[in-house]
Amino acid sequence: MRIDFCRITRTAVAISTALLLFAVPQSPAAVLDEPQQPSGDTPLTARGQQIYQERCISCHGVNGQGTPQAPAPIFGDRSLADLADLITRTMPEGSPEDCVGDDAVAVAEWMQAAFYSPEAQARLNPPRLELTRLTVQQYRNAAADLGVEFRWRQAIDAERGLNAEYFAGRGLRRDKRVFQRQDPMVDFQFGAFSPDGEKIEEEAFAISWDGSVLARESGWYEFVVRTENAARLYVNGRSTPLIDAWVRSGADTEFRGSRYLLAGRLYPLRLEWFKFREPTASVQLYWKPPGGVDELLPARHLIPKNSPEVLVVETPFPPDDRSAGYERGISVSKEWDEAATGAAIEVADRVLAGLKDFLKLRDGEDSAKRMREFAGQFAERAFRRPLTEELRQRHVDEQFAAAKSPEDGLRRSLLVTLLSPRFLYREVEGLDDQYDRASRLSFAVVNSIPDAALREAAAAGQLQTEQQLREQAWRLVNDPRAKSRLLEFLRSWLNLERLQDLDKNDEHYPGFTPQLAADLRTSLELTLAEIVNSEQADFRSLLLADRTWMNRRMAEFYGVSWPESGSDFVPLSFEPERRAGVISHPLLLSGLAYMDTSSPIHRGVFLTRAVLGRGIKPPPVAVAPTAPELAPELTTRERVAVQTSPELCASCHRMINSAGFALENFDAVGRFRDRERDRAIDATGQYEQRNGQLVRFNGARELAGFLARSEETRRSFVRQLFHHQVQQPILAYGPETIQRLSDLLEQGDFNIRRLQVEIAVISALRGWSTKSEQTVADRSETR
Amino acid sequence: MQTRRDFIRKLGLSAAALPFVSNLSTFAAAEARNVRKQRLVVLFSPNGTVPWDFWPDEEGENFTLKRIMEPLNDFQDRLLVLKGVCDKVRGDGDNHMRGMGCLLTGIELYPGNIQGGSDTPAGWASGISIDQEIARFLQSREETRTRFGSLEFGVMVPDRADTWTRMSYLGPNKPVAPIDDPYQMFRRLYGQVQQREVLTGVLDVVREDLQKISRVISGADRQLLEEHAEFVRGMEQQLRSAKDVEATHVLPVLEPGIREENDSIPTITKMQMELLVNSFVNDFARVATFQITNSVGQPKMRWLGIDEGHHELSHEPNENKEAHEKLTKINTWYCEQLAFLVRRLAETPEPGGEGSLLDNTLIVWGNELGQGNSHTLDNIPFLMVGNGLNFRMGRSLVYPKVPHNRLLLALAHGFGHHLESFGNSGFCKDGVLTGLV
């Protein structure tokens, strides 16, 4: 038995290595995670096995793992009929007529059961819960929340804009304040005049804007002040201005500075500005979000309330592993260790720089004693559990004892804490108690360490039942961090990061500027955010929504009449008879297209892989798409069909193309068309489901309707969201988990937040532990 | 206060790439080549001088030091007095602003929004300053490259950035802020060493913890922690070997708890000068500026029994003998600070070389004005000390009102950086200031 296990394991390793080799551009893990209906031992399968052993094994190996003659491992998610069809047409190589009809079906059925299907693959290579370290994103969030825990948190309500104070004279002097008001954004052209002809003289006046800025996603933000006068901008910290143009000098009128911001959090922002004797006055506050362009910092990202400085770690880390389609901390490297060390120093340094703020010393309080207490609390929060006496000794007391001063002791203690595996890894002791539950629940919802309420619940033994965990998860799921995390997931679901730098042929698509491309991105973000933030948070709305957020520039480009007087984003009805949900959003349509023409293949791959969750292997040969000029008489659809007609291509492209064709009504920038080169558009398409049933649709709306109803879409969404939240393979939580969550989504009014909650509960109840690993080992030995 | 950004910049993003162990000073490299080191210090004090107590009466090698320069008696053979060198830059800004902003740049200020006591408002200088130009030149060559290139020291520089508080410029509109907090300067110079010491002290705890946890885990998961422990061990070893190299560094000891306030000026000045000497010993930089207060500086030298602010006194007419007695005392005090620095450099042997630090260092003492009450930019009280640039020292020179740009050029040439002109080229037509070598 033992020998057998070892052999299987080695095979499994070989397969997974092969998987990694194939993991470009996206991992086939999707395939592994979608079990199909199991097939039992039947006379047919026995016959199939016999045929396989006689005719296939010499090239494909015992479990389809491949041999030097045919090295590619065989696995996938084709339906039985589809697989049998493939065998009939292509196998054995050179004489496909030798294995057809019932023989092909028998072999296909046996292969499905033995190694081909995701379920069989899961059995050969049992997924397990792995010990992981914090991902980079988790590290940054945890550091920020360690800071927040010792400061305070500002709630985000509906109010938007900044508090403005207007002063007479160049100084921001309280006694010279003329009036106060809220400004939605900073965008002022005063010309030669003053903001208040009666009370403020135009020669010299000053304004300050105060509040907070809300980050859309995590990354580097560039802030830009444009003025011919003087300005100073503070973002996330008052000790040093991000932009200091207080001395106007020469002809510079644009000033820039960058900050790394984490999504879903508020950062204090203050802009000070004055005019002194210059002939004219103006001031504008822009920003350039990650991957975006310079735009006026919109009111929806400004809050007229102050907020505490956020401890943002800026030390660069190497990127996390994404070979399974989601970020996981499954490996360490020298670069990572160095980054973690640099980050620990950065955090310690910033805590010590803001020590007064963190310690909240009362008058006459012994600061050395308070520092020691603080060090203990810091370690408990970082480790997500109370300190044992031994740990307190080693991480706090001994560090203070070894230091020359209390500050030095605190620095040592902070470093020991931040470099400890108890902070850097997820539930590293594997105790699987309520503190581990609190930690898993928190990471699953807000991707960060537990807050005070969760810590207290764990301490009080109130994370015992599913219901208790569910209540905590519901509390957290309404946190802005959870909402921005869900948006982050939707971005990855829609593969948005691969749609950067949209560029179109100016001649054919005049007006498709970088600004418009950035508008499309904002439009999709706002459209998604509206769904996610709504009471219903209805999954189907992602695919069926009939309104799209647009600004004036975008509305004009897409020929939607602009009803508003302003130019900022508003939700508009956008060709509701032709479009539905994200799949016909112009960002996706133009992102999944070439500079001049649409790309049914890119769109089809997106629909089948990202939305329906099909595993698609990379093309066996690299093929350059036929240039439209070389086949001027063909429509895009015809050209694609011709190019992918060889059998080598067609076995996958039949599925890909016929899904992508349904979006042919949209050109390379996502505008509707019913003709291409004077030929009518054919937007009919079809999809063969995993259960073998064929679905037909015509155009985007019918396609979207099918996707919204499809269980495959739902399962794929569930699986991807689970991985995003939990960073462990869903099959390790039992083969039925995907179905259970998929049913739950359907029965729970398709509420995504509810799904988030249930995923968090599942993850909290069971995680990596020293025990769970034992179980896997046991299972392997007894097999 | 050190900001996060400063911190990261100082770690030089090497936080990930070359953490803590590289970036050790480059003194080893320079020593190996045995090239003579050359250094420049620009010392600034404000509000002009008292001409009759400053300028020697005689020209040439035989001259008597007046009251203000008396503290330098022991070093008369290593002085060079430069009378008749004038800041001729005009344009926007009042004389205090131009005196400061053009002192080391030799070029006009941009128009701007800083309004002085007279003239038109101005902004920053429109060019690089000579200290930064020379530092850039030295940093561009491997044999003269140092960890920082230049260091900008300050003493009680007001916490506001404007034309009166900045004399060093990285380029047009790029003023460099002097660091006037000795503790902050210490962190800048030795922060990494301190971090390394602390890190070395904690990494063994981290490694033990990793091992302890590894023991209860099996299989691939355990391997992950073991790999991690291996990296920690690697870093520990690197840190230890770095420490051996650093053992040769001299770490200055600072008196703790000195507050930044008027009465601490003498103490802070000494602390900063010790840090300056120390950074030369460790070869952290070859160029330094040392700015005592600022243009229009208002220190109240109560330790001399003077309760009025310096700038306020400097406006008094020549006839006010009492005020000028105080002004002479004030300028003598500045000269005493210079003498302290000179003495410290003279008694410190050149590491790995011949003679003392002073043998390889030139100090230029300058001012934003010639005299306070007239606000003249003529006869800026320039005094040079030390033998860093092969100038023929021990002389009192008088020039026929030459633009100071020519002096700035001479400093560059003294480092082998043969610029054709510096700052406003109109003032450089007659080339490098003659008679120095």
Image (tube, coloured by chain):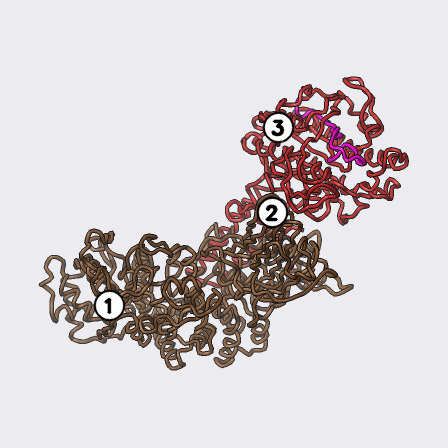
Give the Cα distance between marks 3 and 2: 51 Å
Taking the spot 62% from the left edge, 26% from the top edge, the residue there is: B428
Could you give the CA–CA distance between mark 2 and mark 1, rounded to whole angstroms? 66 Å
Q: Residues within 10 Å of mark 3 (few under 14, many from 20)?
A: few
Q: What color was chain B assigned in the picture?
A: red
Q: Is residue A595 visible?
A: yes
Specify the chain shown as brown. Answer: A
Relative to B431, A431 lies left or right: left
Q: Residue at x 28, y 59 (%)?
A: A599
Chain for numbered disc 3:
B
Point out the residue furthest to the right here: B322
Residue A278 position in % (x across, y down) = 63, 49
Q: Position of residue A595 (x, y in %)?
A: 31, 54
Q: Quadrant of the C terminus of chain A?
A: bottom left
> Where residue B196 is drawn, which disc sits there?
2
Tell me the kind of residue under disc 1: Ala
What element does badge 1 sit on? loop
Q: Nearer the viewer, residue A590 or A685?
A: A590
In this rendering, do the residues under marks 3 and 2 share a single chain? Answer: yes
Question: Which mark sits nearer the N-terminus, 3 or 2?
Answer: 2
Magenta range is B368-390
Q: Main secondary structure of the magenta part?
A: loop
Gap between marks 3 and 1, in whole Å? 74 Å
Marking on residue A683 = 1
Q: Secondary structure at mark 2?
A: helix
Question: Toward which corner of the image does residue A174 lie, by quadrant?
Answer: bottom right
Please say whether residue B207 is visible from this viewpoint. Answer: no
Q: Is residue A124 magenta?
A: no
Q: Are marks 2 and 1 on the same chain?
A: no
Count neighbours of disc 1 (C-alpha within 10 A) and say few if under 14, some if 14 to 19, many if 20 or more: many
Q: Is residue A68 above or below residue B165?
A: below
